[in-house]
Amino acid sequence: MQNPHYKVTKEQHLKELMARVTPIVNVNVIVRKGEHLLLGRHSQFPGWLFPGSRMYWNETPQETALRVLKNEVTGVTASLKKFVAINTDHGWDSRAYGVNLYYLCDYISGEPVSNENLQDFRWVTRDEFIKSDDIYQIEKDLAQELDIAIRAINISEDEMLVEVNKEDEEIGKITKKEAHKVPSRYHRAAHLMIFTSNGDVVLQQRSWNKMTGPGKWDMPGGHQVFGQTIEQCAASELMEEMGISVNLKLIRKGLYQSETQSEFYYLFAGISNGPYGFDKNEVEQVRIFDCEQLLKRNYPEANDILDHVYSYVEELRYFWKPLTKQS
């Protein structure tokens, strides 16, 4: 959006640009797949690096990162998670004075395919990343910032979410930060209620690194990031927070509104007996609760279980109650 109080002509703009040494802004993506990081290499250059591109004048850094994922990491689906670091390639690249921005992205699926920008790819562990002699040093210097970003991956407002209108029709993308402070703009989320075959409810304790409700007991769920369907969002959040893949039934859609946000949420339910695995950056632990005892608040953790969990368990009584009679 242009500043209405500050207008310049095209001639003034060009004069300003010519009077300064304008750095080139490059945006790079660091795709994380478990313990591995994705590197690429161009056939004309010997070293390995993180995929990236120069930012266009009409893009935000996040939009450039999404373009890099699409055009330079072809074949891989990943979600943009968090800004990592900024550095300059002054002295490294004689073609221009570049300012480099790095974004951490979580791998979802697929494998990279050779393209016109990068011909080779490889996945490396952190130790390989640090010790390999064929990775450009300017990338390896990011190791400490990358470690911090991974540990605090949930403390991020950089994610690009799907934006929808009042009718819940997709209209574009919005940063998580904007989605949580502008209630006139709408986004989506998936809420996932998982029960065992005996009719117990499976909950996860939110990581203490979470920005909201750290340490509280909740159902799995998350925002629909740009490039995903709501069904893909539900499946990826379930795998990330519970380590499971199950058939999910869409129960209903609702709209949550507050002074800070407007969110269409999709409530899903499914059945799984585990085993449960999870990302420690997302979840502290996973536990099974008897639904009747939970509703009576007979657990020591009762005050730390979020209110909407109680509401969903009661609402879905028709779903889990028959399972208890089969056991």
Image: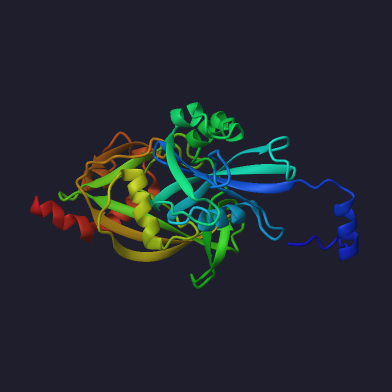
Pick the residue in front: 245 or 205. Answer: 245
Q: Is residue 258 visible?
A: no
Where does residue 77 sit, x and y in percent of width and height?
43, 54
Q: Residue at x 70, y 61 (%)?
A: 58
Pick the residue in front: 145 or 96. Answer: 96
Left or right of 162? Residue 35 is left
Give the tally of numbered discs.
0
Colour mapping:
rainbow
* Picture quadrant of residue 281: top left
Extreme residue toward the front, this view: 44
Where does residue 240 sit, x and y in percent of width and height?
36, 45
Q: Is residue 244 visible?
A: yes
Q: Residue at x 25, y 58 (%)?
A: 247
Where does residue 271 sit, x and y in percent of width and height?
22, 53
Pick the residue in front: 64 or 234. Answer: 64
Left or right of 226? Residue 108 is left
